[in-house]
Amino acid sequence: MSTELRRLRNYIGGEFRDAADGRTTEVVNPATGEAYATAPLSGAADVDAAMAAAAEAFPGWRDTTPAERQRALLKVADAFEERAEELIAAEVENTGKPTGLTRTEEIPPMVDQIRFFAGAARMLEGKGAGEYMEGLTSFVRREPVGVCAQVAPWNYPMMMAVWKFAPAIAAGNTVVLKPSDTTPASTVLIAEILGSILPKGVFNVVCGDRETGRLMVEHPTPAMASITGSVRAGMAVAESASKDLKRVHLELGGKAPVVVFGDVDVAKAVAGISEAGYFNAGQDCTAATRVLVHESVHDEFVQALAKAASDIKTGMPDDEDVLYGPLNNPNQLKQVESFIERLPAHARVEAGGKRVGDKGYFYAPTVVSGLKQDDEIIQKEVFGPVITVQSFTDEDQAVAYANGVEYALASSVWTKDHARAMRMSKKLDFGCVWINTHIPLVAEMPHGGFKKSGYGKDLSAYGFDDYTRIKHVMTSLED
């Protein structure tokens, strides 16, 4: 007996709409492998309509006061709290994540981040007015950039939507946001929530695939394109945006080094690193999945990490004992499997290395040791529950191994030596360096990387600034 699929729709100019040509794509729950909804497969007409709605709404939203925008976003944060269970249900269906962890690890930070940017709206910064030339006064205006085209990923569809819209709207911009084609459900619900609070056209959602995203970035209306995704996608966006000199904000891949020195408490380090590596099935650009361990504790560490991996469970969302759920889609499962299948002969699978069950896209917590710096699995992002371990001999080699990849988003250092930790925080070429911890983020601090991890910052006042432009105004003091 077939079950009717739920119909998700675009949100454009304050109205829910199907794609103009009626095309749809099925949305699959990765925990079951079964379709539960359809979503619009939006084309040029839908993108045109969303951009027109955002452009029409921009002058009015731009001219609101920071206090008005703050009040609106505070209402949004309150609404997220009030409708938390609906958001959780949508996100769990989107992703297969554990329900309890989604409730405790995603809703509170999201609400806090919205409230942070609500406050940031009233903290515009610039140089003070002054007479930098005789008879003339100069001052700086900080203004919104305009319409923002934003593309969110499938690993944290709900939270990444917040990271996109909150600073943009706080700064006075209007938004056209596209969720991943595999995870649109929570974003459509967010549109319903924001639509009840914000003026029509300020926030718009267009569902679709890569082609939809390309149409958004290439559209002449947006002044800025923001994407969280793969390096390949980011490079395509940067190239496309260069044709009309759009501003670009990119948060791309990661291959975070986790540098463990010989003076650590191995058990304590393994507990923190394993959780930071396997959380969300390792589908996190900052995940602690590339561990570098001093040779003096390497064997002990590998043994303890393999034991920790064997104790970690993956499973269905309502199982309270699981740390993580499935990989997001069959392509991602195939990618993780292929990395393990292509391991060189000198590599050793210490734990896991296999699919779990035959329903959904689950993969076991995996540990791989015996690796060399130029191995594929060291150099490329797996984006799955796989932790690699390498050995190093001294601090210089640790730095060389850590920095010896094309990504530069996040890193961590584990040591009791304060001076060493400070040296490493300087030498590590990554946008974030954690010391004796890995993966916590706070709204007040910036998140973003260097090299092929992209540019621009999420979170913090720096993230807010990215959605503004600077204008110099000079006036004569003479009559």
Image (tube, rainbow, N blue to C red):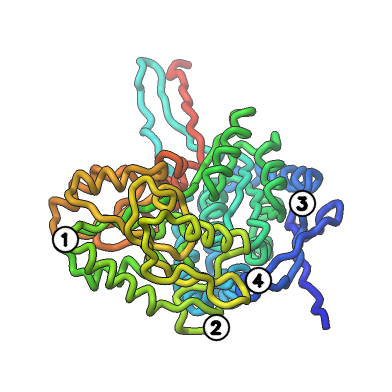
111 up-or-down from 417: above or below: below
Q: Position of residue 126 (x, y in %)?
A: 40, 36
Label 3 sits on residue:
42
Q: Alpha-carbon neighbours of circle 2 within 10 Å: few (<14), some, or many (≥20)?
A: some
Q: Residues within 10 Å of mark 1 (few under 14, many from 20)?
A: some
In depth, the one of 113 and 97 nearer the eye is 97
Q: Residue at x 35, y 22 (%)?
A: 131
| Residue labelled with disc 1 | 296
* Mark number, residue 130: none
Residue receiving disc 4: 29
Q: Position of residue 384 (x, y in %)?
A: 48, 62
User: Left or right: 41 with respect to 420?
Assistant: right
Q: Nearer the viewer, residue 375 or 380?
A: 375
Mark toward the viewer: 4 or 3: 4
Closer to the chain start, of discs 1 and 2, is: 1
Indicate the position of residue 381 as horizontal and vertical percent values: 46, 52
Note whether residue 342 is visible: yes
Dot 4 or dot 2, earlier in sequence: 4
Q: Nearer the viewer, residue 418 or 257?
A: 257
Under circle 2, the secondary element is: loop
Q: Is residue 75 visible?
A: no
